[in-house]
């Protein structure tokens, strides 16, 4: 087993933050037409030191093990971040300790990033400048040329 696979298995053995947050401030749902997988993310904000930060993040995945492992990592590292900070995180950063995803699994991380951005879009207005790194939003704008499509689901 590769070290990536063993990290995924480790995360799956004890996935964090699975399930709905009933009084969430934001929810985002996306699907990948490529593989049919879906992911929903909930965000709950709180006030800390005069800033509005993510208190809790949770997810439900109807998808592969990699998406679940990335979502588990991502929902942990989102805690304490402002919406602006969360907006800047790339799929690679959201995967945390899992490290770089293998090429076949990149869209699994993008599914998590897509659900986060969809949730943030439904939350308070974000005033930070757009991230400069390639993001899912950028990928969506390049849909015609790329192979990966992640779409918001109402
Ligand atoms: Fe589609 Fe992982 S195989 S999200």
Image: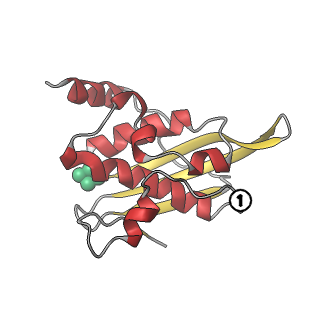
Residue 134 percent across, percent down from the top left: 42, 54
**Residue at x 80%, y 42% (from the top left corner):** 51
Residue placed furthest toward the bottom: 144
Residue 25 percent across, percent down from the top left: 68, 55
Q: Is residue 41 above or below residue 17?
A: below
Q: Is residue 13 above or below residue 91?
A: above
Give the labeled residue for mark 1.
127
Q: Is mark 1 within 8 Å of ligand 1?
A: no
In the picture, which quadrant includes the N terminus?
top left
**Helix or strand or loop: what does disc 1 sit on?**
loop
* Residue 63 visible to an observer of this rendering: no
Residue placed furthest toward the right: 50
**Residue at x 46%, y 46% (from the top left corner):** 90
Residue 11 percent across, percent down from the top left: 35, 29
> Quadrant of the rendered structure where residue 50 is?
top right
Instruction: In this rendered view, identify the residue nearer to me: 64 or 147.
Output: 147
* Residue 132 visible to an observer of this rendering: yes
Residue placed furthest toward the left: 1
Instruction: In this rendered view, identify the residue nearer to me: 21 or 114.
Output: 114
């Amino acid at each position: 087993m590769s070290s990536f696979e063993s990290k995924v298995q480790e995360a799956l053995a004890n996935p964090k933050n699975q399930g709905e947050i009933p009084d969430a401030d934001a929810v985002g749902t996306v699907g990948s037409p490529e593989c049919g997988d879906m992911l929903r993310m909930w965000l709950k904000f709180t006030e800390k030191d005069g800033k509005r930060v993510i208190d809790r993040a949770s997810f439900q995945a109807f998808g592969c093990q990699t998406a679940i492992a990335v979502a588990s990592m991502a929902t942990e590292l989102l805690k304490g971040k402002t919406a602006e900070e969360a907006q800047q995180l790339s799929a690679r950063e959201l995967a945390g300790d899992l490290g770089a995803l293998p090429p076949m699994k990149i869209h699994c991380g993008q599914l998590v990033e897509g659900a986060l951005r969809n949730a943030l879009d439904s939350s308070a207005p974000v005033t930070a400048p757009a991230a400069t790194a390639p993001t899912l939003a950028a990928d969506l704008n390049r849909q015609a040329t790329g192979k990966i499509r992640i779409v918001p689901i109402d």
